[in-house]
Image (cartoon, rainbow, N blue to C red):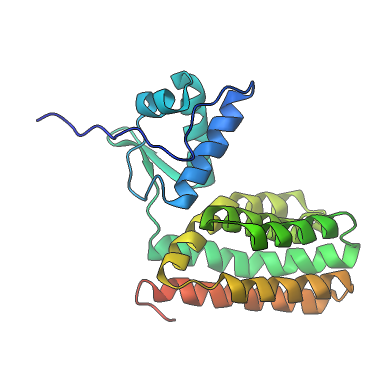
Amino acid sequence: MTPDVAEPPTGALRTLTAPSRTGLVLEALRHAILSGELPAGRPLVEVELARSLGVSKTPVREALKTLSGAGLVTMTDYAGAVVRVVDERLTRDVFETRCLLEPAAVQQAVTRGLGPHAGTARAALAAAAAATDEAGRSLANRDFHRALYVACDNDVLIGVLDHLRDQTALISVNAWTQRPSWEAEADEHALILRAAEAGDAEEAGRLVLQHIAAFQHQALRGFGDER
């Protein structure tokens, strides 16, 4: 039996000609995954992706390794690279970890002072509001959250939360297909930023925890689990 060969993707995966090809391939694939152009479970065949993007297989291979490390792609010797499937276990693990760590990081960051990161957070809110698709909105939301915790001055904590950013974006897009809720989340983001800019670290941390826990509850409802 001849194995199925994935058709070359289109849309966001258009030919790349700029110098930093690995970085551009990485961003093109990330956006294609988060937009659903490359759906969950889709095999990611290097030669097909390279042909579609107009590059050699090397930057595609490097980008897939990075996406695997970020949790958007699974790689096995048997199946090769495949777009990660969002399941209940992934959703629970990611959001429980964020509930434990992110409110504390935000509280510490606000206590220290957000500085220029406040402007980054405001820009991310504007980008999310202007986004024309779920991928753009989710990536902007990801940037918003990082802007609030990155000033905590704890490299280990930042590293753990950074590692969860792409997985959070993937889970968010998956949940939005079940029940669009980004408008309510945008309002929650605005309240969090208001508390952070006012220097109310305790309130900012409380609102972040409430926000993450509420979205976890919504996301798990898609799997029939409302705990």
Q: Nearer the viewer, residue 28 or 210?
A: 28
Q: Quadrant of the C terminus?
A: bottom left
Relative side of 146 to 60, left or right:
right
What residue occupies the far left of the structure in this picture? 1
Q: How many marks?
A: 0
Q: Position of residue 56 (x, y in %)?
A: 46, 18
Give the vertical position of 51 relative to 212 (above or below): above
Give the vertical position of 202 relative to 110 (above or below): below
Q: Residue at x 65, y 51 (%)?
A: 162
Q: Residue at x 39, y 44 (%)?
A: 38
Q: Residue at x 38, y 61 (%)?
A: 87
Relative side of 121 to 44, left or right:
right
Q: Position of residue 147 (x, y in %)?
A: 76, 57
Relative side of 159 to 138, left or right:
right
Q: Quadrant of the N terminus?
A: top left
Q: Residue at x 47, y 51 (%)?
A: 35
Q: Nearer the viewer, residue 33 or 226?
A: 33
Relative side of 89 to 6, left or right:
right
